[in-house]
Amino acid sequence: MADIDTASLAPISQNPDIRYLGRILGDVIRAYGGEKLFRQTEYIRSASVDRHRGIAGADEIDTGLEALNLDDTLSFVRGFMLFSMLANLAEDRQGVAQENGATVAEAVERLRQNGVADEAINDLLAHSLIVPVLTAHPTEVRRKSMIDHKNRVADLMKLRDAGLDETPSGDRIDEALHRQIALLWQTRPLRRERLFVADEVENARAYMQDVFLPVLPMLYARWERVLGHRPPAFLRLGSWIGGDRDGNPFVTAEALRHALGRQAETALVHYLDGVHALGQDLSIATGLSNTPSAVLELAESSGDNAPSRADEPYRRALAGIYARLCATHVALTGKQPPRPSAIDGEAYASPGDLRRDLVVLANGLADNGAGILASGGALGRLIRAVEIFGFHLATLDLRQNSDVHERVVGELLKVAGVCPDYSALDEAARIALLRAELGHSRLLINRWHDYGEETVKELAIVEAAAQAHARYGPQSITAYNISKAESVSDMLEVNLLLKEAGLYRPGAVPQAAIMAVPLFETIGDLENAPQIMRAYFALPEIAALVKARGYQEVMVGYSDSNKDGGYLTSTWSLNHASRALAKVFAETGIAMQLFHGRGGAVGRGGGSSFAAIRAQPRGTVQGRIRITEQGEVIAAKYGTVESAELNLEAITSAALIATLDHDGVSEADETRFAAAMDMISRDAFRTYRDLVYGTEGFNQFFRAATPISEIADLKIGSRPASRSKSQRIEDLRAIPWVFSWAQARIMLPGWYGVGQALGGFADKGLLAAMAQGWPFFQALLGNMEMVLAKSDMTIARHYAGLVPDEALREHVFGEIRSGWNAAHDSLLSITGQPRLLANNPALDTSIRLRLPYIEPLNLLQIELIKRHRAGEADERISEGIQLSINAIATALRNSG
Ligand code: PGA
């Protein structure tokens, strides 16, 4: 019989913070949920802990779960979810996620030690571009209110670490924590309404305002000290929110305008606050200092004639800058700023003009001998912020599916009488036609024609993009990503649409204010990517355009390639494609910028970004990299100033190392290893495809054994779960595919096919050598190991029980289980470990702590799904399912 520990919800953890917070949560549950709920929760918890320690069977968990009525069930699930949330918080505080060598200071130190000259580092940074790109991909199950409460708990824990008893406002910290956790307990974790694009814009905007705006300038100041010089703004922020319309009908021209407007407003208010604060600070008087003439001129032209400030030129100049910023706010957002200016000013035409004024003041301070005031400090950070964020804050990408472009271009050509049926043309004919169209200045659009709805919508987008350039500057939108790109014409079609809005200008050297960026995302498209890019660059006008721009971006998709070909083949194809693309770019003398479309779960390219960037093949980073940051990953990495610092340091340092001191293997080894991977990948691909696309009834198994249909009802994003009404796996979006396998603890996209392929590879010595010395293979195995440790075939068996057809169930589950065993066994034999995660104690502890909390949730979820699917109409059943999905995702972390 499991013991009941009446004072704790976390007795197995060695982490004192987890114990402390678990105890408070226990008290809160008892106080607000009642003694009975507390005892029931505690009973199930300790029964589950005992089972995971191997000292009890599953019967006691079942007994505990059976005793819960529906109301208790909802409260129980919330309790377990909150425990996981608090445990995540405690671990993050301990920097479990932190990686060694993951700061720019450490990277620079390593580079210097390895003989890389400072000039090489500086040269690289002069041409670098590193961009985390926030997307609204729907994998964040938590409401923002829950995340905000959690962050307040973290803030209180920081005060407690500092040895304080009281908060700055005089509350006792222990009591404040109780209060905060009680609020968490009483906050509804599920959204009542679905999310709109505007909500997604606001969520991201909060991170931009609270985290990115302050953190980036601060990091630059730190890096400036490390590097001994001032690098340009190579690390910037990107976003897809309001610009990614692939499969999301709600992202319209209006949404694009809204997103950009809100971003601009946020940036300008930040600058206004900064200028206002500087105005309070820089009270330097002419009689007491030597003010350079440039500052005096700025003060004179400011329009600030207040007698009280007559001898304070910096304050007067800042009042003028403030007034001009207010006018800029009105011009760009159509609204007065929160604190309008007392004097009038002319709107700044560009961020460069604002920067110029601020630099006058910084130089003035330096001339004045007050160098210490000028170099850095609040003014330095403000100048840096303007360089990084301009008036747009984050560069917003456009994204649409190539099929849509094809239809729109088809209609334009038809209406203009150029081509009656574009879709009937073969690739060569399409290219010829599009090039001819791109070559002359006549436009296709007829303003008086009634185009179809889709065409009208798409044209409105490019039009809105052109307006955005005029309003916020060219940095506001730089890339147009083309989903499911598979040909040269896919890129030319986008250039043609851009041309209609004046964003592509023909000429001997054409100019494109927005770059058409192909996204290659199936195994076949990744294989073809190098030849497609070679053919694109072979078009003289494109070569001229790209050379003038200096670089070209290619995006590679992790999730869809995984869904198409399985974990190992996807990972290897991405590596292969990157290397082959790097060769094509090198031949044509064009700098390559890869954009990695990855999510949080391993099946979507998740795992450590630091390791992932360092494991990129030699020559593929070149100081330029963009990476998507999505869903729950955004809160995990950028939820607080501290975590954002760690993660931005990590990606920047990894990019430096990957470019200048690649820790790959010798060329001879690489050739040997690559040949082995080609073989293994072929096998893994076959095994994966046989199961997922070649097994009759597999789709039926998937839809019954996982909560895929229940996930589609979660209100976690504005985008529909499927691109079309079809039930085919090919048409299902990768996110719900990965998410539902994670819930059922099968996590097939993170390992299936790998075990059989590795097991069948004869040269075990070679595999061991690859695991020892090849970062690519280490990352591949390491991520798979984490997934294997989080999956559980005993629980998976229960989910399989949801499949009504017994023969199908036994057959498919049998394949899955033997595949899992093969992956598990081959991983241990290659790495020489006695058990999973033996070499990664921190992660091992973290996962072991979680498992006893997840299993009862899984068992409950299965019961509720059974009742739901049997037609029971009680709303608490669907609510319980949604809550359990939420709780399991929180406990598993990076599962979406
Ligand atoms: P997508 O993204 O469905 O927007 O292509 C896939 C993913 O991020 O997993």
Image (spheres, rainbow, N blue to C red):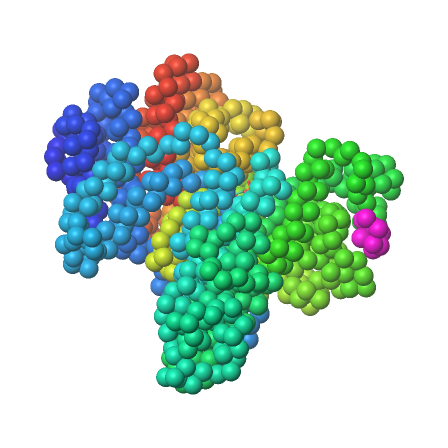
Q: Position of residue 790 (x, y in %)?
A: 36, 41
Residue 584 lies left or right of residue 236; in this view the side is right
Q: Residue furthest right?
A: 417
In the rendered image, the quadrant that contains the N terminus is: top left
Q: Is residue 753 left or right of residue 730?
A: left
Q: Which residue is painted at 51% across and 82% down in the image?
A: 293
Which quadrant of the view contains residue 622? bottom right
**Residue range highlighted in magenta:** 434-443
Q: Who's the residue at 21% across and 55% down the image?
A: 168
State whether residue 246 is above or below residue 129.
Answer: above
Residue situated furthest front in the rendering: 307
Q: Position of residue 90 (x, y in %)?
A: 26, 49
- Is residue 625 visible to us here? no
Q: Quadrant of residue 668?
A: bottom right
In the image, residue 825 lies in the stretch drawn in magenta: no
Q: How many marks?
A: 0
Query: Which quadrant contains ligand 1?
Result: top right
Q: Is 51 above or below relative to 214?
A: above
Q: Is residue 440 magenta?
A: yes
- Residue nearest the viewer, comparing 244 with 783: 244
Q: Position of residue 809 (x, y in %)?
A: 45, 23
Viewer-nearest residue: 348 or 628 = 348
Q: Position of residue 742 (x, y in %)?
A: 41, 37
